[in-house]
Amino acid sequence: MNQKSKVLVVEDDAGIRQSLFETLGALGFAIGEAHNGEDALVQLRMVNYDAVILDINMPGMGGKETCRRICQTFPGLPIIMLTVRDDEEDVVESLNAGAFDYVTKPFQIRELTARLRGVIRRRHAPIGEPDLVSIVGDITLDANRRLVEKKGEPIHLAPKEYETLRCLMEHAGRPVRHENLLRSIWGPVYCNEREYLRVVINQLRKKIEDDPAHPVYILTESHIGYRFREE
């Protein structure tokens, strides 16, 4: 991109803010800084940012409430939450608050950058016919023909397998919660029936992965759900 993507880093730790400012700046992003949620909302009204990196643990308004406020005031603006490792409740609440994605601390800058570029790319992707053809790696899903192929060869999927794969591929690169998959595919009364989902995911992996025990397409988000590989 000729024009730098503008990213607002919202973090009360000055050391982390400075590190992200320098590292992401060197990788081609234009970085703005905010030390709390109130400051972030002020800056977002002055600058048209492409994405927000938001720490969940901040004094004052707090990360989750800041996320809700940003989503209400600037709908569609991608937010990546920085969360504490292995804190399932924080991750779930962040996604419920409207975060597009999350990265757990301590994080690798490579992972954060990949997630950041992914959400910005999807935000600025041209709007066309939705859900027609999704292509990720060797996997192609053609929703018009209800056809799935791997390396050009058709793969037979049961109806629930197809719907699960379609939902995951439509959100490629983003975590999809167990409850959202179950609600979307089986209905609201099945939101707690994770065993149904595990069976379907195992069957899908056998059909689309080269090595189902070490999947590269359908990735497990521990305690949260599943993520289809980034496009």
Image (tube, helix red, strand yellow):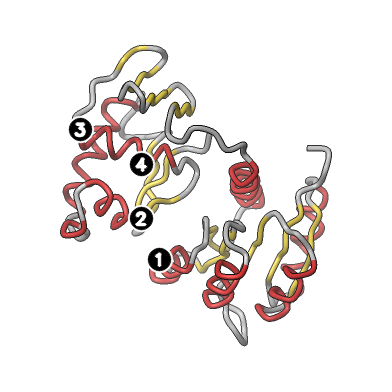
The kind of secondary structure element at disc 4 is helix
Labels 3, 2: front one: 3
Kindly report the distance in space between the C-alpha atoms of the residues bearing marks 1 and 3.
28 Å
Labels 2, 4: front one: 4
The kind of secondary structure element at disc 1 is helix
Numbered circles on residues, count: 4
Q: Where is the N terminus found, in terms of image quarters?
A: top right
Marks 2/4 in contact by CB < 8 Å: the verdict is no
Labels 1, 3: front one: 3
Residue most extreme to the bottom = 60
Marks 1/2 in contact by CB < 8 Å: the verdict is yes
Percent from the top left, x then y, of residue 127? 57, 38
Given residues 8 and 21, the one toward you in this image is 8
The numbered dot on residue 167 is 4
Residue under label 2, please give it.
177
Residue under label 1, please give it.
92
The kind of secondary structure element at disc 3 is helix
Percent from the top left, x then y, of residue 56? 56, 72
Residue 108 against residue 114 in the figure, above or below: below
Given residues 133 and 15, the one toward you in this image is 133
Q: Determine the residue positioned at 69% across, 77% down.
A: 12
Residue type of the residue flagged with mark 2 = Arg
Residue most extreme to the top = 153
Labels 1, 4: front one: 4
Kindly report the distance in space between the C-alpha atoms of the residues bearing marks 1 and 4.
18 Å
